Every structure is written in C-alpha cells, then in structure tokens.
Image (cartoon, rainbow, N blue to C red):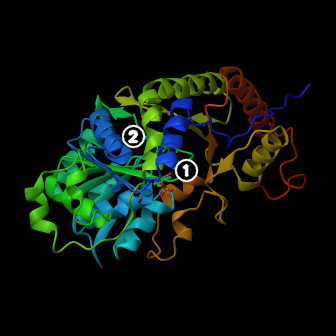
C-alpha cells in the first residue's frame, strides 16, 4: 500500500517555556525598546549580543531587525556603496542579492558546484575588480573555506558570510561567520532560532562594528552595548555614519536567549533527522545525494538532493507524486519564482549574467525543509516515499507528462 505523510513542513517547534516567560516579563514591564532601561538594568538585547558573541567566539555582536538587514549593514560598514562590485553565490536566497542592491552595489554571481557550494575556480576568475564577496552558505553547505580565504586575501577582497543556514556550523573546527570580516545570521522563523524576524552580526573588527552599531540606530547610546567596541572606535565614526534604523527589540531577544542555550542540542536533533533521510535515500537509482566533506560540521535544517540532468517533466512528476503523499518538495529549477525560491534570472535589478553550470544544477535540485517537529520515524517515512516516487519515475513506470499538473 502506498504510504502517506501527514506532518507539516512549515511547522516549527513552539518557543521554549523559558522564552515565553521572559517575553511576558518584558511585556509586563513594557520596556521593549533596547535603550529603554531603568537603574542598573541590562537590556535583553544587550545580553543576547553578549551571549551570541561568546557562542561564536567573536569579539563583538550586534542584534538587528533581520538577517537581510545584518547583511546590508555589514556591506555598508565595510564601505560598499553605489557602483561597487560585490560577488555572491548564484545559488542563494533573494535577501542576499537584495542586500547588495540596497546599498547600490552591483551583484556579480559566481557559479555553483554539484556539491551546492560556490565554485572556487569561477570565483578566482571573477575576483579582480570586486570589492567584496558576500558568501552565502546556502542551505548549510560550506565550501573549502581555507582555499576561499587564500583566494580572497590574495586579491584584497573582503568576505562577509551569510550564515542564515549555518548558525552553529563550522569548517575545520572554525565556526561559519568567523572566517570573513563579518558573519550575518537570521532569526527568522525558518532558521535555527526563531523570533519571527531578527538578525545578528558578528565581527572582530572594532571600526566595522562601531559603524554597524551607529547604522543600526544606536543614536549616541552605544555605551549600553556590552559586546561592542570601546568609545574610541565610536569617536571616529559617530559624526559621519548615518542612522538606518534596524534595531532588535527586547521582546525578540528575550525569546531568543533560551533558544541559544538549547542550540547545540537542537543542531544534533537536525543532524539525526538528516542522517536518517540520507541513509534512506542512499543508492536510489537516478538520485544523487550531496556529499558532505569531513571538514564540514553542518547543521542540517534542510535536505537537498539532485536529479541530475532529468527532464523538466520527470522532475515535475516526482514532485507531484510526492506532494500527493504529503511530502512537500521544493524545486530550484522552476523558471517562475514561487514561494521562497527564486533564481538568479528572476533578480532582474542585477545585470543579466550567464551561469550555465548553476542553471544545469538548479534544474535538477530538489530541496526539503526539516523542521524539528519531525521525528526520526517521520524522516524514515519521508525517505521511503521519495525513494519510491523517484524510482517509479526513473524506471518510467509513471507517465511523466500528462498526468501531472504544473507543480507547486
Ligand atoms: C533567510 C535568509 C537570509 C536572511 O533572511 P531574513 O528573512 O532577512 O532574515 C539570508 N540568506 C539566506 C540564504 C536566507 O535563507
């Protein structure tokens, strides 16, 4: 009998009870704005920054309104402005090229490998003339960071890391977000901590962080930050840095602090789900799993596989069959942007660019969320369903074309 999955791919866990209680305390006293403190009170936001800096090992941390804001703020803080070329992954999410465009930069996309990371040969070719690389660890896949940093350092190109999918992950023991000049994180609902919206920026560079803090809307209250550079760094920048308000508030920080304490345990739970899926899909004819290098300590809050060089109608057939059995697969090959997924060719504010290798990979790239509301039994069931549907279409048992309505 054909099995069905009844869970929801978009349902995250509730906020931990300690976070609910902390949020209620903030609402009861009413001081939600981060600089609204009384007596010797330290704002939840300042405490979160201190704790997140400690978690990543960074000297400084700034909490902001979103992951996209953190990226834009970091770009501005390193001096990216109108006309500057910023390299970024061709395979990423819309807030990434959007942040470059928002500061007037010119996004130039770098090709993607079959392992879903930035292509370092293409990067090397595009580095001359670029001011920065906004490196997106898209879907939690981390490239060879040692080689990437050698290339960028040799060209004098600054690296900002988009760690929306790698909070808690590392390459060769060094956390993502700690390789470049700054690391940017999102605490939007579908990431590794959930405050609805939110972002965090970390760096060891005092000038960058002083500028970022003023940019975020600190007014002259930056002295109330705890994970921030000393007053000297601010003296240099306070008159010349515009306020582009994008602060985090105490309510969100209150919700996030207990989640940060739980993060290592949550990461282990994600990886347990991932390993069950990976084992369940191993050696499925026609399906290619993404290899995970030994240097990479990943946090698998989502799962990807390739149907390499499959025709569009066959890919659609797999998605439709899985959907009919309750398994929600996303396809990055879709010509029209749908839901959260869009492709480089739908970001038309950027110059149109030829990226044949990325296009070929995205045409066969299937993606799935792994919320922690799934059990390992759920993951095993999902793997059985995908395996059966991919096998059926691969072997040509299923009529690929006519039976299938346009997916998504
Ligand atoms: C979610 C996400 C961001 C930032 O998103 P916000 O919604 O602005 O917090 C950045 N990069 C990637 C790859 C993402 O998935």
**Quadrant of the image containing the N terminus:** top right
Picture quarter with the C terminus = bottom right
Q: Is residue 197 left or right of residue 150?
A: right
Relative to residue 40, is residue 155 depicted above or below? below
Asked if marks 1 and 2 touch (Cβ < 8 Å), the reply is no
Tell me which residue sits at (76%, 51%) in the image. 316
Q: Position of residue 245 (x, y in %)?
A: 37, 67
Q: Along the horizontal axis of the image, is 378 left or right of 67?
A: right
Which residue is located at x 46 percent, y 43 percent? 165
Question: SS class of the residue under badge 2?
Answer: loop
Residue 289 quadrant: top right
Q: Is residue 345 left or right of residue 315?
A: left
Residue under circle 2? 142
Q: Nearer the viewer, residue 360 or 102?
A: 102
Vertically, is 336 above or below 232? Answer: below
Q: Which residue is mark 1?
A: 196
Residue 126 visible to an observer of this rendering = no
Instruction: Give whichever of 158, 163 is nearer the camera.
Output: 163
Secondary structure at badge 1 equals: loop
Q: Is residue 174 visible?
A: yes
Earlier along the polypeptide chain: callout 1 or callout 2? 2
Q: Residue at x 10, y 64 (%)?
A: 235
Q: To which quarter of the image does residue 67 belong?
A: bottom left
């Amino acid at each position: 009998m054909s099995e069905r999955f009844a869970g929801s791919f978009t349902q995250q866990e509730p906020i931990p009870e300690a976070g609910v209680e902390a949020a209620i305390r903030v609402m009861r006293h009413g001081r939600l704005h981060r600089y609204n403190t009384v007596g010797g009170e330290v704002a939840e936001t300042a405490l979160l920054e201190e704790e997140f800096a400690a978690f990543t090992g960074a000297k400084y941390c700034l909490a902001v309104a979103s992951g996209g804001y953190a990226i834009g703020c970091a770009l501005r803080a390193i001096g990216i402005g109108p006309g500057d070329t910023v390299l970024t992954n061709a395979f990423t999410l819309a807030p990434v090229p959007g942040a470059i465009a928002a500061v007037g930069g010119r996004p130039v996309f770098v090709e993607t490998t079959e392992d879903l990371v930035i292509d370092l040969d293409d990067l090397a070719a595009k580095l001359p003339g670029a001011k920065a690389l906004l490196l997106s660890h898209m879907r939690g896949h981390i490239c060879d960071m040692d080689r990437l940093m050698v290339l960028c350092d040799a060209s004098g190109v600054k690296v900002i890391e988009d760690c929306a999918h790698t909070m808690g992950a590392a390459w060769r023991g060094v956390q993502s977000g700690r390789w470049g000049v700054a690391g940017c994180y999102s605490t939007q609902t579908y990431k590794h901590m959930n405050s609805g919206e939110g972002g965090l920026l970390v760096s060891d560079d005092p000038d960058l962080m002083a500028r970022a803090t003023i940019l975020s809307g600190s007014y002259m209250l930056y002295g109330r930050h705890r994970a921030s550079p000393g007053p000297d760094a601010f003296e240099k920048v306070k008159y010349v840095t515009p306020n582009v308000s994008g602060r985090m508030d105490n309510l969100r920080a209150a919700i996030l602090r207990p989640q940060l304490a739980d993060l290592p345990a949550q990461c282990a739970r994600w990886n347990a789900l991932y390993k069950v899926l990976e084992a369940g899909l191993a050696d499925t004819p026609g399906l290619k799993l993404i290899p995970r290098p030994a240097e990479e300590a990943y946090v698998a809050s989502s799962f990807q596989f390739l149907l390499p060089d499959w025709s569009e109608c066959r890919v659609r057939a797999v998605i439709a069959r899985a959907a009919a059995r309750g398994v929600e697969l996303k396809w990055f090959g879709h010509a029209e942007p749908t839901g959260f997924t869009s492709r480089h060719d739908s970001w038309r504010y950027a110059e149109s660019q030829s990226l044949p290798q990325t296009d070929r990979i995205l045409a066969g790239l299937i993606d799935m969320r792994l919320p922690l509301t799934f059990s390992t039994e759920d993951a095993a069931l999902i793997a059985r369903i995908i395996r059966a549907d991919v096998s059926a279409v691969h072997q040509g048992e299923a009529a690929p074309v006519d039976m299938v309505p346009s997916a998504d």
